[in-house]
Amino acid sequence: MRKTSLALALFGVIASAQAHTSAHEGHIVSAKNDAISLTFDIVHAKVVKNGGSLTFQTEVAAGIGAEKPTAVGKLAGSAVYSYVWPTSLNSADIGFDEGKGIVALAVTAHPDFDDTPRYDENKDGNKANDGNEWHSHWVVLTEDKACPAGLKVRDIPEGATPKVPVTWPELPIYIDSPGYEPRFTSTELTVEVPVKDIGFKDDFNFDAVTSVLKVNASVHNPLLCVTAVDDIASGDLSLPGFTR
C-alpha cells in the first residue's frame, strides 16, 4: 500500500494530485495511478440523492474490498483498512456534540476486534466476531501530531460524558456504528444512508479516501490514528464533490 501523509494533504502540500471534477456535476473523477494497489486506487466517487436516502459511492481500478489487514492477535497495534468519505457535515448532524471535527462515513475491516456490537455481519449468531467483515461507521476526525498521518478519530477523555448517538459502540472515541450495509461489485462500493440519520441534511460537500488506521500500541490516547493514505480522490482533500 502506498503511504501518503494525510496531514500533508490537508495542508495542500501534495503536488502530484491528478484528480478533477468531472462532467457529472458533483462527482469526483481521479486518474488511475499505477503506484497504488488497484483495490485502493480511487477512480470515481459520488454521493447521490435518492429521496429519503443518500447513496455514497466509491469506484476503484479493480478488486474493491479484496485486501484486508493481517491479524496480529490483539487489539494493541492492530490495523484497520478503510474506504472513507470525508464530508462537510457537522458532528451534531450524526448525533455528537457540535463542531468536534471532520465528519466522515467509513467502511472498514479489522480482524482483531469487533466494534459493531448490535450487528452480526457474518450471520453466525455471534455479534462479537465480525470485525473482519466490511462494515460501516460514522467517525469524527481531528488533527493530532502524535499520529503518523496527522489525524485521528477524536478521543473521548476518561470521565467525559459527551453527547453520543444511540448506536455509539461504547468505545472512548467519536465513532458510531449505524449498521448501514456496504455493497460491493468488482470495482464499486456503495452505502445507503437515510437522510433522517443526518438531520435531513442532504446538501454537503465530500471527498473520497482510502486509508489505514492503527490502534495505539498502548491502547491509549490517541487510540485510533490514521497512519497512512493510499489515495485521495481530489488529490488534496478539498472536498470538491457535492450531493446531487
Image: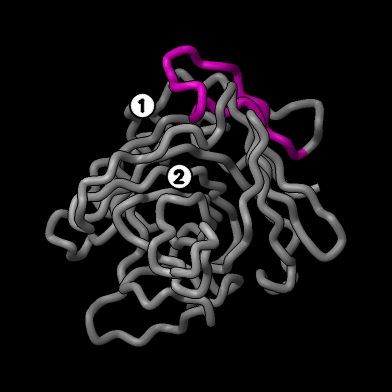
Q: Where is residue 114 drawn, in percent x and y? A: 38, 63
Q: Where is residue 123 drawn, in percent x and y? A: 54, 62
Nearer the N terminus, badge 2 or badge 1?
1
- Residue 100 showing in the rendered view: no
In the drawing, what numbered circle is on residue 1? Answer: 1
In the drawing, what numbered circle is on residue 82? Answer: 2
Q: Amino acid at mark 1?
A: Met
**Image check: 163 left or right of 147?**
right
The residue positioned 22% from the left and 81% from the top of the image is 158
From the viewer's perspective, is residue 11 above or below residue 203? above
* In magenta stretch: residue 42: yes
Crowding at mark 2 (Cα within 10 Å: few <14, some 14-19, many 20+): many
Q: Amino acid at mark 2?
A: Ser
Q: Where is residue 62 drawn, in percent x and y? A: 58, 23
Quadrant of the snapshot with the N terminus: top left
**Image check: 10 left or right of 165?**
left
Crowding at mark 1 (Cα within 10 Å: few <14, some 14-19, many 20+): some
**Image check: 209 left or right of 193?**
left
Label 2 vs label 1: CA separation? Answer: 12 Å
| Highlighted magenta segment, given as a residue range | 26-44
Q: Indicate the quadrant where residue 140 lies.
A: bottom left
Q: Indicate the quadrant where residue 211 lies.
A: top left
Q: Secondary structure at mark 2?
A: strand
The residue positioned 41% from the left and 50% from the top of the image is 132
Q: Where is residue 181 drawn, in percent x and y? A: 63, 57
Q: Report the number of numbered marks.
A: 2
* In magenta stretch: residue 27: yes
- Residue 144 showing in the rendered view: yes
